[in-house]
Amino acid sequence: MNIKSNAVLLYQAQDLKSWRESLSCKDARPLIGFVPTMGFLHEGHLSLIKEAKRHAQYVIVSIFVNPSQFNDASDFEHYPRNEEQDIYLASQAGADAIFLPSVEVIYPHGAQTWVNVGALGDTLCGASRPGHFQGVCTVVTALFNLVGCQVAVFGEKDYQQLAIIRRMTQDLHLPVKIIGLATFREANGLAMSSRNARLSPQARQEASGIYSALQEAQNLWRQGQTSLLYLEQRIKEALPTCATIDYLSFCEPHSLQLLERLEQAHDPSQPVLIAIACFVEKVRLIDNLILAPLTSNSQK
Ligand code: PAF
């Protein structure tokens, strides 16, 4: 396949520098918007690129399967890849440049510095994938510095990742505005993920039940059911049989601290994040949903 791309392809730090220097200012928006990805692009990524286009004059997309954020070698190995198609799709979605670094470009020989997160990384995926967020934060910091963006767009499917990147950007005074975009879903409700491509057609259909189970809990909450223990039970019952739970957690949406006392009625004026990770055909899928605070009008 030889697909033509309108976007400039960049491989080295020096290429990025030359590209930045070639840009001329067109309007008052920030010059560079950035969408970091691990490739195998889908509609969700394309929506991030389109969003970045709204916020910046030029958009650059990176495609880099970051080895340091995988704590499972086989997961890294099986992560889907299709560079040629990614270049075409990113370019079609409006990317002006695509950065395709090698491992050596991101982690130069002898690199030994890591960006570590605090308590935000202790729960959910941070607990079940030790080292994952250290890898994410390190690569995102390196990419921000290499790319020189003023705006970066991330998806809310990776809720914890987005919260951590916002915190890291603030804590380290990184001059980048972080924008979060709502989860893009397949027609059946399954959260879009590059990993979905590894599911059989049947499992891909059945896995839509993960989101339906979360929605069922949301409906019960809206009807006034504030026992999180009950909601947890209902989600477990509603999950498709193909899904094996890695975690199903109820958290405070800002601190990501786990709500421990699920048996007690939850204060309906306080929002709750429900986050789930499960395995379907050995593929790890995540999703989340926020139970918005209930007002007397919303309980109808
Ligand atoms: O969300 C992802 O695809 C990755 O974690 C990211 C942000 C590109 C870092 O490798």
Image (tube, helix red, strand yellow):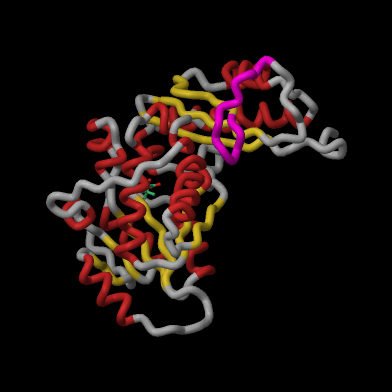
From this viewpoint, is residue 39 visible? no
Q: Is residue 106 left or right of residue 208?
A: left
User: Height in image: 61 above or below 39?
Assistant: below
The N terminus lies in which quarter of the figure?
A: bottom left
Q: Is residue 262 magenta?
A: yes
The C terminus lies in which quarter of the figure?
A: top right
Q: Position of residue 78 (x, y in %)?
A: 26, 36
Q: Is residue 280 left or right of residue 177?
A: left
Q: Which image quarter: residue 21?
A: bottom left
Say which residue appears at 36% left-offset and 42% top-offset.
116
Q: Position of residue 113 (x, y in %)?
A: 25, 48
Front-lying residue, 227 or 111: 111
Say which residue appears at 49% left-offset and 32% top-offset.
205
Magenta span: 251-263
Front-lying residue, 126 or 154: 126
Q: Which image quarter: residue 161?
A: top left
Q: Position of residue 85 (x, y in %)?
A: 31, 56
Number of numbered discs overlaid on the protein picture: 0
| Magenta part, dominant SS | loop
Q: Which image quarter: residue 213?
A: top right
